[in-house]
Image: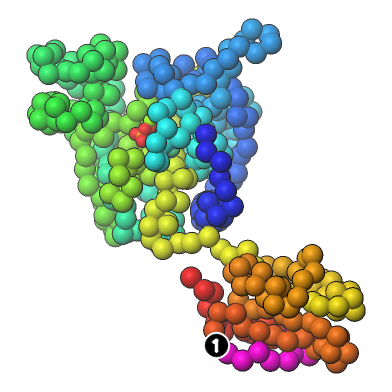
Amino acid sequence: MPDLLPDACNIQSQLIRAAAEIVESYGFREIRLPLLEKTELFARSIGEVTDIVEKEMYSFDDRNGESMTLRPEATAGVVRAVIQHSLVHAGPQKLWLAGPMFRYERPQKGRYRQFDQFNVEAFGLEGPDIDVELIAISARLWKRLGVTDLLTLELNSLGDGAGRQRHREALVDYLRGHADLLDADATRRLETNPLRVLDSKNPAMQDMLAAAPQLPDYWDDASREHFETLTGRLDALGIAWTLNPRLVRGLDYYSRTVFEWTTTALGAQNAVCSGGRYDGLVEQLGGKPTPAVGFAIGVARLAALMEAGGTTAQPVADVYLAALGDAADAAAVVLAERLRDALPGLRLVVNAGGGSFKAQLKRADRSGARFALILGDAEVESATVQLKPLRTHEEQEAVAQSALADTIRERMQATPAAA
Ligand code: ATP
Ligand code: MG
């Protein structure tokens, strides 16, 4: 469970803020849920024979002897809340949430035991228009974060009903016929969750799996139409996609559309955003039949991509205010608060702990600030301040305190932020 230090937090916050702003511009609203749910919720929704439920959950008995689990994913809790509060009663619901998930996995780069996700879930909409919207949202976020070129969209449909059942039977027959090639995981899943065998990463099984019965060959007409409308609209939006007939997602509750944005820039942990339809889940958990679709972004993985794309943590300060002498110290506080009134977004650090101007300017430099403001006895006397650019070779200049806010606003806009 990693500690997120300030630089890492800063990049992740840039991500969450951008994502929240974008989804809210599409009419999604935030929901916040407990990190802890009853264990049975996850067993019933995710499925007993998934990696998550079989071996990744942090579960414990509470003081009442009831088994509780730190949420390994968000969807089950959202569905529980939607049912419990009759949210779809009032019509479709478009929700987002961000926060930590917990999975007992082997920690490695891009894979942690506590990790944040940004989740989007829409209820009561059959699609494919909403499927298109979710993918458009994700594509817009990649653009905003400068990572579009690092990501590829893979799509599939799990189909529905009888077709899906026929595929399952054909797949099980095929896999039984190749029992000698199955590894231990696949042998176990063959009887319980055969679809999952399809997305095995075991190199020794790839040729055999490539020739296995493919989901698209078993799509019913409605599923095919759903898929074709979705892909036609993505084409119209200029969002490139590829069909991956073996994309199944790890969770049992998906149906029809499944998608994944993957990257080659992060090594083995290549999935950055995964989503799909789970039309059966609300009913399965005791609600009225309600179609639903959502996606989850792995925040740390996307943040790593942002860094690969050139994003850096924002500096501590835009402006660093240095003051020397009692009178200047006193004036500095007043001046700083006035600047904060006039420029609410300004990151302004006032020197604390004294020190010579030289020492203070060193701190100013380390803060990443673009400008130092210097206030000594002479400046207090003349109601001015010295404005010193720290990232360019421009000369220091005296500015009247009354004009300081305007000057800083102009100078900040004129010179773009350092990388
Ligand atoms: P993977 O195949 O990498 O195990 P998954 O299918 O288990 O991923 P999901 O349950 O779909 O992942 O979760 C959505 C996203 O959350 C993933 O695409 C990934 O970016 C991120 N994620 C999943 N597990 C972890 C983890 N242990 N640490 C960090 N990020 C994770
Ligand atoms: Mg996993």
Q: Where is residue 263 in the image (x, y as percent from the top left)?
A: 31, 48
Q: Mark 1 points at which residue?
A: 393
Q: Which residue lies furthest to the top in this view?
A: 65
Residue type beneath disc 1: His
Quadrant of ligand 2 in image: top left
Q: Is mark 1 on a helix, strand or loop?
A: loop
Seen from the viewer's position, the closer of residues 292 and 195 is: 195
> Where is residue 329, by image quadrant?
bottom right
Left or right, 216 with respect to 99, comes to: left
Report the magenta residues as a range: 394-404
Q: In this view, does 375 lie to the left or right of 109?
A: right
Residue at figure coordinates x 58%, y 90% from the top left:
394
Q: In this view, does 235 lie to the left or right of 8?
A: left
Specify whether 288 is left or right of 90.
left
Is 397 included in the stretch rendered in magenta? yes
- How many neighbours does mark 1 have within 10 angstroms: few (below 14), some (14-19), or many (20 or more)? few
Write the residue at 30% across / 40% down. Answer: 268
Residue 361 on image: x %, y %: 67, 75
Q: Position of residue 219 (x, y in %)?
A: 21, 31
Percent x, y of residue 22: 51, 56
The residue lying at 10 percent from left, 30 percent from top is 207
* Residue at 38 percent of width and 57 percent of height: 308
Residue 382 location, quadrant: bottom right
Q: Please determine whether, in this image, residue 254 is positioned above or below residue 152.
A: above
